[in-house]
Amino acid sequence: MGKIKKHPPVKLIVGFIFKDQLAEDKALFFLKRRFGRIDFESQTLSFRHTDYYQKEFGTGLKRKFISFKKLILPQDLAKIKNITNKIEIKLSLRSLRQINIDPGYLDLAKLILASTKDHRHRIYLGQGIFAEVTLFFQNHAFKPWECTYPDYATSEYSAIFNQIREIYAQQITKK
């Protein structure tokens, strides 16, 4: 029988999909108030991997990732996803979201994303939220599974998460 150990804190990451820069600025404001200082912000990328969001947001979508300096406990992911859902609603105009906010976390071995949608590869966390292991770390890089979203399977995203992982690795070795 294995011994039960306390899980170390993990690195909170958030991905945005948006069209209007103002929506991202407002989301950042609310997220910083709730989760503290940001220690990584990716460049703004073009989001063209799926047309899933076009009906709601239109075309010309953008993608950005951030991570927060303060580490979180992995069991808090469901609560965090519910907070980001409330921010999306607060920033909506005429019942249409202006931004998609996807929280998750990474540790040295994997990237986990939270979702309100169930699927065969997702695990229920509670509070209406599911989690999936979106990427795994192997041979010095994050790698996709067969069910990984197409954009997360790109080398461009892997490079972003590798940078965040390095920040995280430095944080946990200082403890």
Image (cartoon, grey):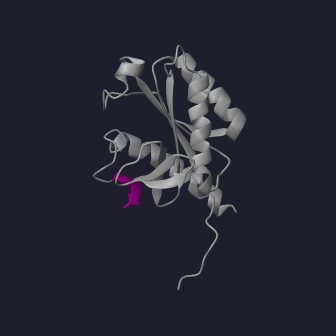
Q: Residue at x 37, y 43 (%)?
A: 152
Q: Nearer the viewer, residue 50 or 63?
A: 50
* Residue 89 picture location, percent across and down: 57, 26
* Residue 157 picture location, percent across and down: 40, 41
Q: Is residue 46 above or below residue 68?
A: above
Task: Specify whether 72 is left or right of 140.
Answer: right
Q: Residue furthest bottom?
A: 1
Q: Is residue 150 above or below residue 94?
A: below
Magenta: main secondary structure equals strand
* Residue 28 picture location, percent across and down: 62, 29
Name the quadrant of the C terminus: bottom right
Q: Residue at x 56, y 28 (%)?
A: 88
Question: For the magenta stretch, what is the residue range?
Answer: 135-144
Q: Residue furthest left?
A: 146
Figure disc tally: 0
Q: Residue at x 62, y 46 (%)?
A: 79
Q: Residue furthest top?
A: 94
Q: Residue at x 48, y 49 (%)?
A: 130
Q: Nearer the viewer, residue 114 or 152?
A: 114
Residue 142 on the magenta segment: yes
Q: Is residue 67 visible?
A: no
Q: Nearer the viewer, residue 18 or 64?
A: 18
* Residue 12 picture location, percent across and down: 58, 47
Task: Specify whether 43 is left or right of 40.
Answer: left
Task: Specify whether 34 is left or right of 92.
Answer: right
Q: Is residue 151 visible?
A: yes
Q: Is residue 16 above or below residue 6?
A: above
> Which quadrant of the view contains residue 120?
bottom left
Residue 117 on the magenta segment: no
> Which quadrant of the view contains residue 172?
bottom right
